[in-house]
Image: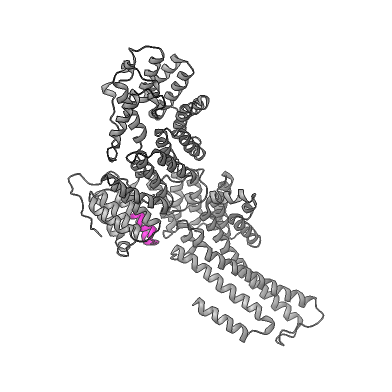
């Protein structure tokens, strides 16, 4: 229809319009067509049903490539309308100033009439221009969301900050401020203003101003749901989940059809562990705003409910499975894997892997690689993980790279390749502290302390007051003999922890003990190690520290007791999915390392130095240390956890919109089963 309208525009403007007005009519028709094409492009991206603004709010982030066509058309519409406004204004101005009658093809021969007509047309053109500028501002807000803070800041630094002033969010605010001058009480403009500030989210000022805009909206349009919903998004940014839930419930009370609130409430319920409430809102969302992403998210959450929900999850996925959608096939493979049908899961994931070369097939490759590792098919697993690393996006690529690095560091026995993979991951600047902590553990195990330090420093930049970051950073600083920095981080972590989290407090005390021991304060070090054991009797590092204190005191009768964990306190090494025979080789190598004379072995406890008086306890404890340090948060276990919800300090509006990346694309979570163990496992159909 738009194509037909464009063709009629070209013919009718030349047939019916007077020659002096043909250009103005072409601008009018051209702007109208471009406006509709731009809006249609956004509607197709969002699969909008009803309000386009609601769909934009509820949709996942788009890419710049996806947004560019609609943006270009809206820009053309604005430019054509601007030319049309200026054209009519020139006619009105020239006619009013002229002493002669302006003859518009003999249609209007009265000077006053010409001025009136031209002025009225200019006002109509201005109204069209302002509407198109408003849509362009909304588009620029979405474009800013697509660019993300890192890409924009990178370009801004390269161009000396010039791009920052021309960034989409700045353009959007400039357009909105211009429009607000003629209509300061428009709820639509106020909503766009608030959305722009939440998208930018550079500081608390943005959140305060957005909150104020939403208050004005509530006052001007008390029946509309957008005001309470917006205040809920501000509460989310501040980390107040209860307030966010209450505001979104108010939004639904005003309009039960306002599906963005269902998306947010589902996310809050997931974060708070309310599985049933999350499902309730996702089911409504799937009905009110049916989208592929919502279907996948609902199926993933159902799978997490345990065997009782596996069949429903497959039913939810079935329309996408029938279309051979690779993401749906991958999720089906996860359901089959969780149901214990590993052969079927591998077959399904292989099927998904063949459906093109894109991020969705990269997810399938990652899952397939993990299953092949379990079967000790390491060559095939490596091939799949390499593909997932190269083709994957976001967390998929990062976790595939972590799994690949684990293979290099472990059974493939290529530590240099593992270190190179860690460096590659760090260069991508992951925005999840959990990933960075995970990687620092692995780099530390390889003896790559500088890499571990870099990972933790990136994590601290994201969460400067997170003790889970500060404690391992303190330990790495200690490994690098940066004693003052190690002490500073450990003490800061203890202050932040207060009386919570005995394990982290115990680890921090061990670092302080190591620092004091290296400074020669042996008795103070022993006190710290003792305090650490009082908090956490299973802390292997504290036992090793006491043994090192005894050795430093030349007390060879004590190491055998200090380095032997009391039976009641012994803990088994974590038992992740088996990774070939690597853990056994790790222990064998560690035993050899303790016996050799080299002081450069990568396990820190081997640096005590060889001594026949130590007996056989130290090799065993070194093995436990290695297993504990490397495997205490295994890759798969960490991937199993839900993706952390962007909270205070997050850049961009990702935390404000029910985006697809709120849940990781591959969830291994096994929630507490909703049925008894007596129920037989469900049968999941193969593809």
Q: How many marks?
A: 0
Residue closest to the eye, 427 or 431: 427
* Residue 366, x across and y down, in percent: 35, 50
Q: Is residue 280 visible?
A: no
Q: Residue at x 62, y 52 (%)?
A: 164
- Closer to the camera, 443 or 99? 443
As drawn, which residue projects farthest toward the front? 597
**Residue 441 visible in rendering:** yes
Position in image of residue 683 (x %, y %): 20, 54
Which coloring applies here? one colour
Which residue does the image show at 46% across and 54% down from the upper left? 251
Measuring from the top left, give residue 20's x and y in whole percent: 69, 82
Quarter residue 83 falls in: bottom right
Please say if 111 is above or below 233: below
What segment carries the magenta color? 286-298
Magenta stretch holds residue 297: yes
């Amino acid at each position: 229809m738009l194509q037909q309208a464009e063709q009629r525009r070209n013919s009718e403007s030349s047939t019916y319009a007077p020659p002096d007005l043909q250009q103005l009519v072409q601008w009018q028709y051209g702007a109208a067509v471009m406006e509709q094409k731009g809006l249609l492009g956004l509607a197709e991206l969002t699969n909008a049903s009803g309000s386009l603004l609601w769909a934009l709010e509820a949709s996942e982030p788009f890419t710049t490539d996806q947004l560019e066509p609609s943006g270009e058309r809206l820009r053309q519409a604005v430019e054509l309308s601007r030319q049309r406004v200026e054209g009519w204004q020139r006619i009105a101005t020239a006619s009013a100033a002229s002493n002669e009658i302006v003859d518009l093809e003999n249609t209007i021969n009265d000077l006053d009439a010409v001025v009136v007509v031209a002025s009225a047309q200019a006002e109509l053109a201005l109204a069209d221009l302002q509407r198109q500028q408003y849509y362009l501002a909304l588009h620029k807000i979405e474009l800013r969301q697509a660019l993300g803070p890192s890409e924009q800041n990178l370009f801004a630094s390269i161009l000396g900050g010039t791009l920052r002033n021309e960034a989409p969010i700045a353009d959007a605010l400039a357009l909105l401020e211009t429009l607000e001058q003629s209509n300061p009480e428009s709820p639509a403009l106020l909503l766009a203003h608030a959305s722009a500030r939440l998208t930018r989210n550079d500081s608390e000022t943005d959140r305060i101003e957005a909150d104020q805009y939403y208050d004005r909206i509530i006052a001007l349009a008390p029946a509309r749901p957008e005001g309470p919903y917006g205040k809920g998004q501000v509460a989310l940014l501040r980390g107040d989940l209860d307030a966010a839930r209450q505001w979104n419930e108010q939004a639904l009370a005003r309009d039960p059809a306002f599906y963005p609130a269902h998306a947010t409430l589902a996310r809050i319920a997931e974060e708070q562990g309310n599985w049933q409430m999350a499902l309730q809102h996702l089911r409504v969302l799937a009905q009110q705003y049916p989208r592929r992403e919502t279907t996948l998210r609902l199926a993933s959450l159902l799978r997490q409910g345990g065997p009782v929900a596996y069949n429903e999850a497959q039913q939810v996925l079935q329309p996408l499975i029938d279309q051979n959608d690779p993401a749906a096939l991958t999720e089906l493979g996860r359901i089959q894997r969780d149901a214990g049908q590993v052969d079927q899961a591998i077959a399904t994931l292989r099927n998904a892997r063949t459906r093109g070369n894109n991020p969705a097939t990269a997810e399938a490759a990652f899952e397939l690689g993990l299953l092949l590792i379990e079967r000790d098919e390491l060559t095939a697993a490596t091939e799949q993980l390499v593909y997932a690393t190269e083709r994957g996006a976001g967390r998929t690529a990062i976790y595939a790279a972590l799994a690949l690095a684990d293979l290099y560091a472990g059974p493939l026995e290529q530590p240099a390749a593992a270190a190179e993979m860690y460096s590659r991951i760090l260069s991508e600047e992951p925005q999840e502290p959990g990933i960075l902590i995970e990687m620092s553990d692995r780099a530390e195990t390889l003896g790559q302390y500088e890499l571990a330090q870099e990972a933790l420093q990136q994590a601290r930049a994201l969460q400067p007051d997170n003790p889970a970051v500060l404690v391992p950073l303190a330990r790495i600083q200690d490994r690098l003999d940066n004693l003052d920095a190690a002490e500073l981080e450990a003490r800061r972590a203890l202050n932040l922890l207060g009386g919570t989290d005995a394990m982290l407090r115990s680890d921090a005390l061990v670092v302080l003990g190591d620092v004091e021991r290296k400074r020669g304060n042996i008795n103070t070090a022993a006190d710290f190690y003792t305090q650490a054991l009082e908090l956490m009797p299973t802390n292997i590092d504290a036992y090793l520290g006491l043994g090192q204190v005894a050795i430093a005191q030349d007390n060879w009768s004590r190491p055998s007791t200090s380095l032997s964990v009391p039976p009641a306190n012994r803990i088994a090494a974590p038992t992740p999915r088996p990774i070939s025979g690597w853990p056994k080789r790790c222990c064998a190598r560690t035993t050899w390392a303790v016996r050799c004379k080299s002081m450069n072995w990568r396990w820190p406890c081997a640096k005590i130095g060889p001594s026949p008086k130590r007996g056989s306890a130290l090799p065993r404890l070194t093995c436990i240390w290695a297993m504990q340090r490397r495997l205490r948060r295994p890759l798969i276990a960490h991937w199993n956890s839900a993706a952390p919800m962007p909270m205070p300090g997050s850049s961009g509006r990702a935390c404000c919109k029910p985006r697809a990346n709120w849940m990781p694309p591959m969830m291994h979570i096994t929630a507490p089963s909703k049925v008894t163990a007596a129920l037989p496992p469900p049968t999941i159909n193969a593809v």
